[in-house]
Image (cartoon, rainbow, N blue to C red):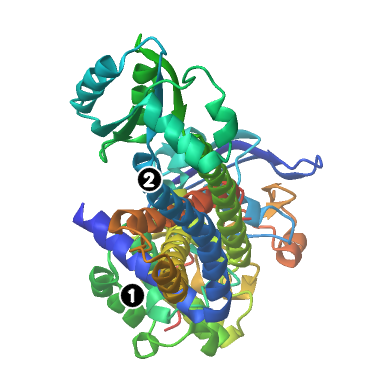
Amino acid sequence: MIQLEEVTKRFPGGQEALSGLSLSVDKGEMVFITGHSGAGKSTLLRLIALIERPTSGQVIVDGQNTSRVKRRKIPAYRRQLGMVFQDHKLLYDRTVFENVALPLVIAGMSYREAGRRVRPALEHVDLLHKEKQNPATLSAGEQQRVGIARAVVSRPKLLIADEPTGNLDPDLSLEVMRMFRRFNEVGVTLLIASHDISLIDKLGCRRIELDAGKLAAPTGDLDSWEDEGEWVTVAHSGEEFPE
Amino acid sequence: MTGWFSRHVSTAIGSLGRLVRQPFASLMIILVIAVTLAIPASLNLVVKNAQAVSAGWDNALDFSVYLQRSVSEDDAGKLGNLIAQRADVESVRLVTAEDALKELRDQSGFGEALDQLAENPLPHTLVVRPGASNTSQTIVLLQEELSNLPEADAVQVDTEWVQRFHAILDILRRAIVIGAALLGVAIVIIIGNTIRLDIQNRREEIEVTKLIGASNAFVRRPFLWSGIWFGLFGGLLAVGLVFYGLYLLEQPVARLAGLYRSGIVVMSLTLREALAVVGIGLGLGLAGSWLAAARHMRRIEPR
């Protein structure tokens, strides 16, 4: 689903966010990206969403080489993705329903047509009863669920999330992750940047750790890997997802 | 096509709702546009009325065609009949040299002096009254043709001051067109600036919608509709202002007409002119918002 080949992103100041990063995520996987702040997690997601372009290297998403997506075609490209943000990025001048309907309206549906897709999405995140409210009146956890409903309403094959639980307490975080897991079970590929390692370990998903724009190399030293969490990949542990 | 249409309708209604939610700010902009449109529209009306009033004047004025002294009274009479048959001439009156001299003697007070003359120095004169269907151009043509007659010595036109008046009106009308063009530019700038501020205020919203896949056209659409609404309401209000001005002038004009015992009626805006004012407002509104949106929308990209 996602392939990065020798991707480098250098910012105008000369600072390198990613240096020669290669990785791949298969269809139907749910993968976490971890690492310290500044390790390049956000930059990686921004390259996938075409908010940034790589300085060199290739980013291939669902068979599409993103460097060949022209500026004019970026909106259509982004409509294939679902995106969830740490700060939700909801619009506070309209209702929950209208927020979730927005991707469909952008794609050319009327609000009435969109309703048939918006209501199931809201039901999925257990917020159907609040569809007419303004998102500003909702709690942080509820707002994040609105953001998730908006990300999945157009049924994307790939969902990327940047610190989706960054502002949530552990219980709410677990609930959000549980929702992601359910989407994963119906075939959505997920790529989630997070620093909440204890939560990720509970889910037993693959974990890609970045360090200074590269894959963090396992040192082979058991202590340092536990302390620093320098795992490249944690295979499916088979541990049941706590329900 | 129907999808495109319904999307525009819902965007249009949404933009209208935004205007209504800020009634004071919206009204101010609409008022500025209305006044800016009403000024040239009403000046144009003034010129139009002045032209209508003066149009009656040049047709009512007679030409005096002074014939050569060698032309006999008989020939003068025949020439008069010939000219009277022209389509653009209503009537011709012959003033013989004797009549003219008599008139001059009676009216000028030079009676004694004139009696000293050995012979009558005055020529026969044809007083030509042009037909009512003449325009200022055909009047000039008639005048030229009369002065080109071999029998004619000179043609005196009493309409010169009317033509000067027409020339002034022509200049005025051109000045109004130039002024209107400048005011139109002002409207484009006013609306463009309003839309620019609106875009800045909604920067975050634009970023978010672009982030989830909105095209430039999609984010531009509500701003274009705001411009259209500003222009449309500004144009309608401008027409309203012009009609209100006409209403205020109705009584004094009626009094003036009474004093002159004439049937002066103020010409109002025709339906076509009123529609033109509204249409120009709408077009300028769209132009202003388009310029602002095209300039600023592209720069707002998600960070």
Residue with the mark numbered 2: B55
Of tags 1 and 2, the one toward the viewer is: 2
Q: Which mark is residue A57?
A: none
Crowd tier of the residue under label 2, counting other residues whose Cα lies within 10 Å: few below 14, some 14–19, many 20 or above: some
Q: Which mark is residue A121?
A: 1
CB under 8 Å between callouts 1 and 2? no
Residue type at mark 2?
Ala
Crowd tier of the residue under label 1, counting other residues whose Cα lies within 10 Å: few below 14, some 14–19, many 20 or above: many
Q: Position of residue A9 (x, y in %)?
A: 68, 41
Residue A192 as seen in the image, left or right of residue B246: right
Q: Is residue A205 above or below residue A165?
A: above
Residue B295 as seen in the image, left or right of residue B136: right
Residue type at mark 1?
Ala
Chain of the residue where label 2 is placed in the rendered structure: B
Q: Tell which of A81 and A107 is nearer to you.
A: A107
Q: Is residue A119 above or below residue A212?
A: below
Q: Tell which of A114 and B42 is nearer to you.
A: B42
- Residue at 58 percent across and 73 percent down: it is B28
Q: CA distance from mark 1 to mark 2?
A: 74 Å
Q: Is residue B117 above or below residue B159?
A: above
Q: Tell which of B65 and B262 is nearer to you.
A: B65
Q: SS of the residue at dot 2?
A: helix
Residue B155 can be seen, yes or no: yes
Residue A137 as seen in the image, left or right of residue A181: right
Q: Tell which of B113 and B216 is nearer to you.
A: B113
Residue B159 can be seen, yes or no: no
Q: Position of residue B262 (x, y in %)?
A: 36, 63
Q: SS of the residue at dot 1?
A: helix
